[in-house]
């Protein structure tokens, strides 16, 4: 008779339903044989326990199920505290049975005596007292552990198969397997190792361990994992088993020693594809055969799941790679910017190919060099750089035009070329490089590398090759586009430079701008303009940028050199891509060893080569046709600009010379100061002729001597005391013969100059002595000095002679003016003497006014100065003061000398003397500026004066000033008809007449002047 799973047999249920188990039945003998036999022989566990967990009864099946040998031992355990696992829902059991008095098919986990768990299905009921309280539980339990294990296994198998379907990738699948197995057994430390048959390597895609780090791909070796891989069998290796295998030489310790180790092979299609391992480092966590059986049971499903996911991964990778190619293709067609294009290629490749390091290098066949545009090593990006092709793996890819695949560098290194290290400088373990081919020619290399071996296969090689084919066309297009942009940009910059050069008039500035800008446009480390001089058979440095300090300004190269001569004859540029290789003898002409490549482009104007524009590189470099054309265009623009500058300088020079002569002529015509004129003449002579110093010696006919007059540009005063007789020295010879004297190499010749110790320090090399002749008479000598070799042309000599002519005219005019000035001074002295004589005659006629004229003249001048009268007018004021009463010469003596007061008629005649003065002085042009005082000095401020009766500021200032001084001196003088007044009385009178007879401002200043200058009042006219 059998029962359904989880159900007690019917007779047991009847036994429990119809008969209570006698209390202490299993403890006390003597109950009925029948009941005892049924109880003991039941195949299900029968128990009675108190609600607090004390065991009252239990049959043999119950004791055996929990692993106890006797009821006595079981009775010592409190089931509520020790009998159920934490996962068992015991509280739910108690709540339900106390509520419903019975429970059916309740599943839970009970704890056996050895600590292991047993799954049971439980049927139970409550036995209550008469008061309704529960006395105990009694029921049956059936061991369903195997059923539960089978269910878990089934669920695990299903979960693993679902994980294989639902996991996004292998990593997620490995995590899911770990989690699923964790529900079946202890797998805290869990490892999945897969075997790569092609490379004979164990890889560890999933590695969870308390102590050991994940292992890199390695040979199977002699570890426990390798042992399982070799044997293809499950290995349960507690310490005893491990030690025995160690002694037999089958295994060796790898990593940290564990307490328990369990590994099962992963077999798919009768091939071991890897090993699944769990191990324990804790004594309380141990494995058993059941765990080994369980792990072995699920291993097939795990292997199938991994293989399935591998297949899915391959399909996904293939799709991703197809998508990659599509993305790259779209990207390549959407941009012509090379840097953007290569960056897209890098980013997309990294999505499908593992790489610790990556680079894309472009190959320049013309210059045999690689430019590493994209360089990333261990996540660190390096700047773009160039290097010669040299030797190495990349070079081999370029030269062979074929991919190179290195699976394990350590194994293959004996058969490999030199590997150039970069980035982290670590040696790669796996390396893959494919050529980028366009039209059968290599235009670049794509490379990936790993620091672990066997990272790449033919699959990655084919993928990169396909990508390289896609990239090749775009690189070629991008290079053409970039070249066209560079050409357009250079043309724009050259055009802009040409416009700029035409606006620069100074040749030196223009050349400096040319070489500086040309070097930038053509990316040249140096740039020079070498001016051709066919007469001297050489090309001389005219401007430069980039040459080392100390390069001579007059550096030159002979035109007879074969390369230069050929260029002069044909107009072809000189192109030397590698000096040491192509023209080693040419290096001797270069001023710096840094130059590795050199180019010279003839500067042609109207079919003539006027110079060379030179450029250079610090590495071997073959310029493209576009670069050669651009450089030649630069040279042509330079030639045109230089010719324009030369013509402009020539015109400007001629204009400057004309302006200089004009300025000298203006100085001559506008000034009679000979020193001023000579200073201008000498300055213009020095600047226009480009000489260091010049001087003028003036000829004195009376002494027949040449005397120093002026000089400029000298370091010493050695020549300032020069007095030479005609015929003495270079200047004397020039003056005597009226011819130019020219002396070269003065430093080495004995001459009159060298007799002066001071003159030696001048260090003059060149001398010119030019006679200054006007109206066929010698006026002096113009001397020219220069401290170095002077480039003298006919134009220069003509200009020198022109300067000399101007100097002669200036000296002649100055001498004429000097003579005229002397005559004028003598004439003016005669006039002043006459005036003083007239004033003295008046004083002698009227003895009472003797000395009056001289006194008022002096005081009037002082008061005029105090009033701020211009110095130029003081001379005329003096003369007017001296002649103020000149009109009295026409007054009869009986009136002028009358001792008594004058009658009105006599006063009328006396008041006529200003009119007589005007009539007398007006015809004399020399004295007209002095007429205001003789004519207006009797006019009053208020208009009551005579002869015209004008007032205020209509009266000339000098007349107003004189009126105050005249009254001051007259009242202080004794007359026939009155006594002299005191100073205070006169001052009081003058102040009282302020605003009436006198100008108030003049009165105020006069009063202050008397206080500050006592000399005015100290002389007593009495």
Image (cartoon, rainbow, N blue to C red):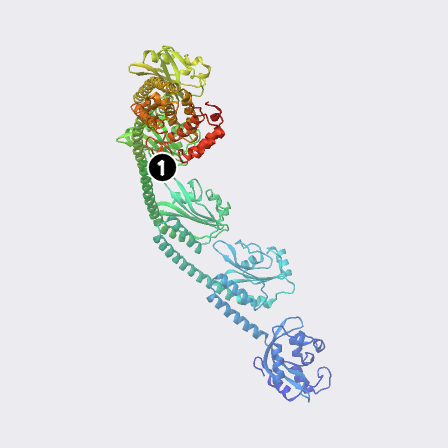
Q: Nearer the viewer, residue 26 or 355?
A: 355
- Compared with 711, 216 (above or below) is below
- Residue 936 picture quarter: top left
User: Taking 698 as reference, is 183 left or right?
Assistant: right
Q: Nearer the viewer, residue 797 or 395?
A: 797
Label 1 element class: helix
Q: Nearer the viewer, residue 464 or 532?
A: 532
**Viewer can see residue 261:** no
Q: Nearer the viewer, residue 535 or 801?
A: 801
- Compared with 442, 509 (above or below) is above
Spot occupied by residue 189 in the image (x, y as percentages of width and height) = 58, 61
x 32%, y 40%: residue: 496
User: Taking 535 as reference, is 526 left or right?
Assistant: right
- Residue 8 picture quarter: bottom right
Count of numbered circles in the view? 1
Position of the N terminus by quadrant: bottom right
Most extreme residue toward the left, as rendered? 606
Spot occupied by residue 396 in the image (x, y as percentages of width and height) = 42, 43
Residue pointed to by mark 1: 518
- Compared with 800, 620 (above or below) is below
Spot occupied by residue 743 in the image (x, y as percentages of width and height) = 37, 15
Spot occupied by residue 50 in the image (x, y as percentages of width and height) = 68, 81
**Viewer can see residue 57:** yes
| Disc 1 packing (10 Å; few <14; some 14–19; many ≥20) | many
User: Taking 935 as reference, is 111 left or right?
Assistant: right
């Amino acid at each position: 008779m059998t029962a359904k799973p989880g159900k007690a047999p019917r007779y047991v249920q009847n036994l429990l339903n119809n008969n209570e188990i006698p209390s202490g039945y299993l403890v006390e003998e003597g109950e009925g044989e029948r009941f005892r036999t049924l109880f003991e022989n039941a195949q299900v566990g029968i128990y009675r326990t108190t609600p607090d967990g004390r065991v009252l009864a239990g049959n043999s099946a119950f004791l055996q199920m929990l692993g106890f040998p006797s009821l006595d031992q079981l009775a010592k355990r409190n089931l509520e505290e020790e009998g159920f696992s934490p996962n068992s829902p015991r509280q739910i059991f108690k709540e339900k049975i106390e509520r419903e008095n019975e429970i059916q098919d309740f599943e839970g986990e009970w704890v056996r005596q050895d600590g292991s768990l047993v799954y049971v299905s439980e049927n139970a009921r409550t036995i209550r007292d008469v008061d309704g309280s529960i006395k105990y539980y009694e029921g049956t339990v059936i061991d369903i552990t195997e059923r539960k294990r089978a269910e878990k296994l089934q669920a695990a198998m299903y979960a693993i198969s679902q994980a294989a379907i639902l996991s996004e990738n292998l990593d997620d699948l490995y995590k899911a397997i770990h989690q699923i197995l964790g529900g079946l057994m202890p797998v805290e430390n869990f490892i999945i190792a897969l075997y790569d048959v092609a490379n004979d390597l164990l890889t560890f895609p999933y590695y969870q361990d308390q102590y050991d780090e994940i292992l890199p791909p390695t040979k199977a070796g002699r570890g426990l994992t390798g042992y399982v891989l070799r044997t293809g069998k499950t290995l349960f290796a507690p310490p005893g088993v491990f030690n025995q295998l160690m002694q037999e030489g089958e295994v060796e310790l790898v990593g940290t020693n564990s307490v328990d180790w369990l590994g099962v092979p992963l077999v798919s299609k009768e091939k071991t594809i890897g090993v699944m391992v769990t191990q324990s480092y804790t004594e309380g966590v141990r494995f058993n055969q059941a765990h080994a059986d369980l792990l072995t049971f699920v291993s097939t499903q795990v292997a199938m799941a991994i293989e399935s996911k591998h297949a899915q991964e391959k399909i996904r990778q293939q799709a991703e790679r197809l998508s990659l190619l599509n993305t790259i293709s779209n990207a390549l067609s959407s941009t012509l910017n090379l840097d953007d294009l290569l960056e897209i290629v890098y980013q997309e490749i990294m999505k499908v190919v593992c790489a610790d390091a990556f680079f894309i290098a472009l190959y320049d066949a013309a210059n045999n060099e690689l430019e590493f545009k994209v360089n990333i090593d261990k996540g660190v990006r390096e700047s773009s750089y160039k290097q010669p092709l040299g030797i190495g793996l990349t070079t081999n890819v370029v030269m062979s035009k074929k991919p190179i695949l290195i699976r394990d560098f350590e194994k293959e290194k004996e058969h490999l070329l030199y590997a150039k290290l970069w980035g982290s400088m670590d040696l790669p373990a796996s390396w893959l490089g494919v050529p980028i081919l366009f039209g059968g020619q290599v235009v670049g290399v794509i490379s990936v590398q790993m620091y672990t071996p066997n990272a790449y296969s033919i699959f990655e090689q084919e993928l990169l090759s396909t990508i390289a084919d896609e990239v090749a066309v775009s690189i070629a297009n991008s290079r053409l586009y970039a070249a066209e942009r560079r050409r357009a940009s250079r043309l724009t910059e050259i055009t802009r430079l040409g416009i700029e050069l035409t606006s620069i008039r100074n040749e030196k500035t223009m050349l400096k701008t040319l070489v500086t800008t040309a070097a930038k446009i053509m990316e040249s480390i140096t740039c020079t303009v070498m001016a051709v001089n066919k007469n001297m058979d050489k090309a001389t440095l005219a401007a430069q940028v980039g040459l080392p300090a100390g390069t001579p300004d007059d550096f030159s190269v002979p035109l007879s050199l074969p390369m230069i001569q050929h260029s002069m004859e044909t107009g072809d540029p000189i192109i030397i891509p590698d000096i040491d290789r192509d023209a080693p003898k040419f290096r001797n002409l270069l001023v710096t060893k840094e130059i590795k490549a050199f180019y010279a482009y003839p500067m042609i104007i109207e079919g003539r080569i006027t110079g060379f524009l030179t450029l250079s590189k610090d590495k071997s470099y073959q310029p493209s046709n576009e670069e050669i054309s651009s450089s030649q265009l630069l040279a042509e623009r330079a030639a045109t600009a230089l010719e324009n500058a030369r013509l402009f300088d020539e015109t400007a020079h001629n204009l400057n010379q004309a302006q200089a002569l004009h300025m000298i002529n203006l100085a001559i015509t506008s000034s009679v100061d000979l020193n001023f004129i000579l200073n201008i003449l000498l300055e213009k002579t020095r600047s226009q002729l480009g000489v260091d110093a010049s001087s003028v010696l003036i000829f004195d006919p009376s002494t027949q001597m040449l005397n120093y007059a002026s000089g400029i540009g000298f370091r010493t005063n050695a020549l300032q005391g020069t007095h030479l007789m005609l015929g003495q020295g270079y200047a004397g010879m020039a003056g005597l013969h009226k011819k130019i004297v020219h002396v070269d190499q003065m430093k080495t010749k004995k001459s009159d100059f060298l007799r002066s110790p001071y003159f030696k320090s001048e260090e003059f090399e060149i001398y010119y002595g030019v006679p200054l002749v006007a109206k066929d008479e010698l006026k002096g000598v113009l001397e020219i000095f220069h401290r170095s070799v002077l480039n003298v042309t006919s134009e220069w000599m003509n200009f020198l002679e022109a300067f000399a002519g101007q100097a002669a005219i200036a000296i002649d005019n100055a001498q004429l003016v000097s003579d005229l000035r002397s005559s004028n001074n003598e004439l003016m002295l005669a006039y002043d003497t006459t005036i003083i004589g007239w004033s003295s005659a008046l004083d002698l006629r009227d003895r009472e006014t003797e000395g009056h004229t001289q006194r008022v003249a002096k005081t009037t001048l002082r008061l005029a100065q105090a009033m701020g009268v211009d110095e130029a007018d003081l001379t005329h004021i003096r003369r007017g003061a001296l002649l103020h009463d000149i009109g009295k010469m026409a007054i009869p003596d009986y009136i002028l000398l009358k001792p008594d007061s004058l009658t009105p008629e006599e006063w009328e005649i006396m008041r006529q003397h200003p009119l007589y003065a005007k009539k007398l002085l007006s015809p004399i042009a020399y004295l007209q500026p002095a007429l205001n005082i003789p004519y207006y000095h009797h006019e009053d401020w208020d208009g009551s004066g005579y002869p015209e009766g004008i007032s205020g500021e209509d009266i000339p200032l000098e007349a107003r000033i004189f009126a105050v001084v005249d009254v001051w001196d007259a009242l202080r003088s004794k007359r026939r008809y009155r006594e002299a007044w005191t100073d205070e009385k006169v001052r009081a009178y003058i102040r009282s007449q302020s605003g009436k007879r006198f100008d108030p401002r003049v009165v105020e200043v006069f009063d202050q002047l008397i206080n500050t200058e006592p000399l005015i009042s100290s002389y007593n006219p009495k």
